[in-house]
Image: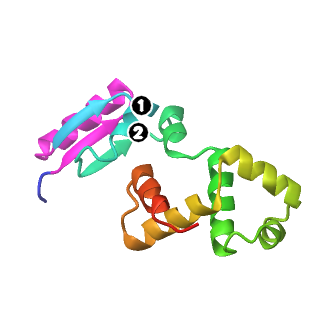
Amino acid sequence: MQPKNLLILAESSTGQALSATLEQEGHQVTVAPSNPAIMASVRNAGYDAVIADISSAASVDATLPTLEEVERRHIERVLDETRFNLSRASRVLAIDRTTLYNKLKRFGLQRDSIRARRLAVQSGAHNGSTVVEHVAAHIPA
């Protein structure tokens, strides 16, 4: 097996024991405490694999979206699929239109921002809000 660059996110005693075993097999290993800040920063850090102690609440907290984020994404998807038809979207979501209006306001969702995000994803350029803002600026009103 070819040596890998690994990151272990765990309590020090668990991480050190696993690190010693993996290093004996020729892998390059980094051990770090499992916390949300580190979990968020390792996504693009160039590791071949990240080993996280799943018993740690911090690693779970950092990888799962909040209920509010899941709700926002779902509403955004429904609005995109219904082409921002609010009557149809409220039926699909099984909520009153007034409730949908309130959620749109709370999440800052607008027709142009949803169209821009869809176009960015379709073009393969969905790497951040700057792309979305750039695409939104080029959509006719």
Horizontal relation, residue 2 to residue 135: left or right = left
Label 1 to label 2, Cα distance in Å? 5 Å
For badge 2, the amino acid type reads: Ala
Instruction: Measuring from the top left, give residue 41's x and y in whole percent.
Output: 35, 38
Horizontal relation, residue 135 to residue 93: left or right = left
Residue drawn at point x = 45 percent, y = 64 percent: 138
Q: Quadrant of residue 28?
A: top left
Q: Is 23 inside the magenta-drawn segment?
A: yes
Q: Secondary structure at mark 1?
A: helix
Quarter holding the N terminus is: bottom left
Viewer-nearest residue: 141 or 74: 141
Circle 1 residue: 37
Pointers 1 and 2 in contact (C-beta within 8 Å) = yes
Above/below status of 3 relative to 140? above
Q: Quadrant of residue 91?
A: bottom right
Count of marks, rendered view? 2
- On residue 85, the disc is none
Task: State the extent of the magenta-drawn residues as a range.
Answer: 4-27
Residue drawn at point x = 37 percent, y = 69 percent: 124
Circle 2 residue: 40
Instruction: Measuring from the top left, give residue 98's x and y in whole percent.
Output: 87, 55
